[in-house]
Amino acid sequence: MVGETISSLSREWLPFWVRGASGTEEVEVAFTAPGVEPVENDWADAEWDLGSVTVKGATARILFGPGGTTSRPEGTWQAWVRVTAPPQLPVLPAGLIDVV
């Protein structure tokens, strides 16, 4: 996901493709200011879109916006995905989200 735009009034699923994911791992998403790495308190639980799972990977998603799992005020935000797949713990930059 790169350059996604969402209204600050909207609540919708934001998808993030993760190469190599099986769709069974724990997955989290964080949103930070561009160029800023997430800290532990930035992470929110996400889920897998089970209809997206292939041998190449899966799509993580989070319900974003007012009343969703997480939201952010108007501005540009860097999205991050973290997958817990012991012994691996990849933290993946996932593009920019413009909240307008």
Image (cartoon, rainbow, N blue to C red):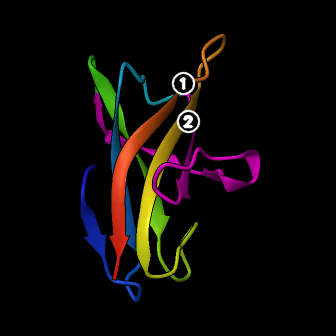
* Residue drawn 56% across the image and 81% down it: 67
> The residue under label 2 is which amino acid type?
Arg
Which residue: 74% across, 45% down?
40
Closer to us: 4 or 20 = 4
Which residue is located at x 58 percent, y 66 percent? Answer: 69
**Amino acid on which the number 1 mark rests in the picture:** Pro
Determine crowd level at label 2: few under 14, some 14-19, many 20+ residues with C-alpha closer than 10 A.
many
Point 27% across, 70% down: residue: 5
Q: Which residues are magenta?
A: 25-53
SS under mark 2: strand
State yes or no: residue 78 in magenta.
no
Mark 1 in CB contact with mark 2 (< 8 angstroms): yes
| Residue bearing the label numbered 2 | 82
Q: Quadrant of the C terminus?
A: bottom left
Name the spot of residue 37 as percent of width and height, x first.
58, 44
For label 1, count other residues whose C-alpha is less than 10 Å away and answer few (under 14), some (14-19) or many (20+).
few
Q: How many marks on residues?
A: 2
Q: Quadrant of residue 6?
A: bottom left
Q: In this image, 71 relative to 4: left or right?
A: right
For the view shown, which residue lies furthest in the top direction? 87
Q: Which residue is mark 1?
A: 90
Q: Secondary structure at mark 1?
A: loop
Locate residue 65, reporting x and y percent: 47, 76
Q: Where is residue 16, by image quadrant?
A: top left
Residue 13 percent location from the top left of the image:
37, 63
